[in-house]
Amino acid sequence: MSKVNIIYWTGTGNTESMANLIAEGAKEKGADVNLINVSSASEADVKDADVVALGSPAMGAEVIEESEMEPFVESISGAVSGKKIALFGSYGWGDGEWMRSWVERMEGYGANLVNDGLIVNEAPEGESEEECKNLGKELASC
C-alpha cells in the first residue's frame, strides 16, 4: 500500500476541495492518505511518504502562495530529489504560468514528477472533479 501525503495551502477552499478529491481517489485504490495543511507540514512529511502531492492556488502575478507554501517548498528542496511528486492547484486568472514555473522548479530540485501539474479554474466540478480523483488513483499506484 502506498503512503500518499497531500500537502496544500488554500485561501478560498478551492485547493482544499481539490486535495480532498485527490485523497478520495487515492483511498479508493487502497492508499494510506494523509491530508496536511502546509502550516502543519514538515520535511519529514515529504521524506516519510512514497509519493507527495503539493497544492497551492495561483497568487498575485501567477506565483504559488508566498507566506506559507513558498517557504515550505524552499525548505524541502533537498528532500525531493528522486521523490515522486505531484503538483496541483486552482486559479482564477492567467494561463497557468505559475504551475509551469513550479513544475520547472521541482524538476530542478530533482523531483520525479508524476504529472505536469493539475490546474482547475476556480472550484473543481464535473470533469475537473474526476481529474482530481484520477490523479489520486494514479498516486496510489506509484
Image (tube, rainbow, N blue to C red):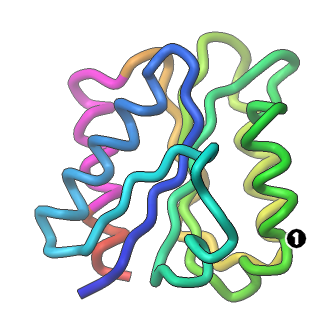
- 104 horizontally vs 35: left or right: right
Q: Which residue is drawn at 75% across and 80% down?
A: 79
Q: Which residue is drawn at 18% across and 63% down?
A: 27
Measured from the top left, where is residue 32 in percent x and y?
Answer: 26, 73
Q: Which residue is drawn at 61% across and 82% down?
A: 47
Is residue 134 located in the magenta-colored stretch of the structure?
A: yes
Mark 1 — residue? 108
Q: How many marks?
A: 1
In this rendering, the answer to whether 72 lies above or below 50 is above
Measured from the top left, where is residue 101 in percent x and y?
Answer: 83, 46
Quarter of the figure with the C terminus: bottom left
| View extreme (front): residue | 40
Quarter of the figure with the N terminus: bottom left
Q: Quadrant of residue 16?
A: top left
- 130 horizontally vs 120: left or right: left
- 135 horizontally vs 97: left or right: left
Q: Estimate how packed mark 1 is, as few (under 14), some (14 to 19) or many (20 or more) residues with alpha carbons within 10 Å.
A: few
Q: Which residue is drawn at 76% across and 35% down?
A: 64
In this rendering, the answer to whether 36 lies above or below 29 is above
- 64 horizontally vs 1: left or right: right
SS for callout 1: helix
Task: Please state the extent of the stretch shown in magenta in the rendering.
Answer: 124-136
Q: Main secondary structure of the magenta part?
A: helix
Measured from the top left, where is residue 141 in percent x and y?
Answer: 29, 80
In this rendering, the answer to whether 81 lies above or below 99 is below
User: Looking at the picture, which amino acid does disc 1 mark?
Assistant: Gly
Is residue 33 located in the magenta-colored stretch of the structure?
A: no
In this rendering, the answer to whether 29 lies above or below 118 is below
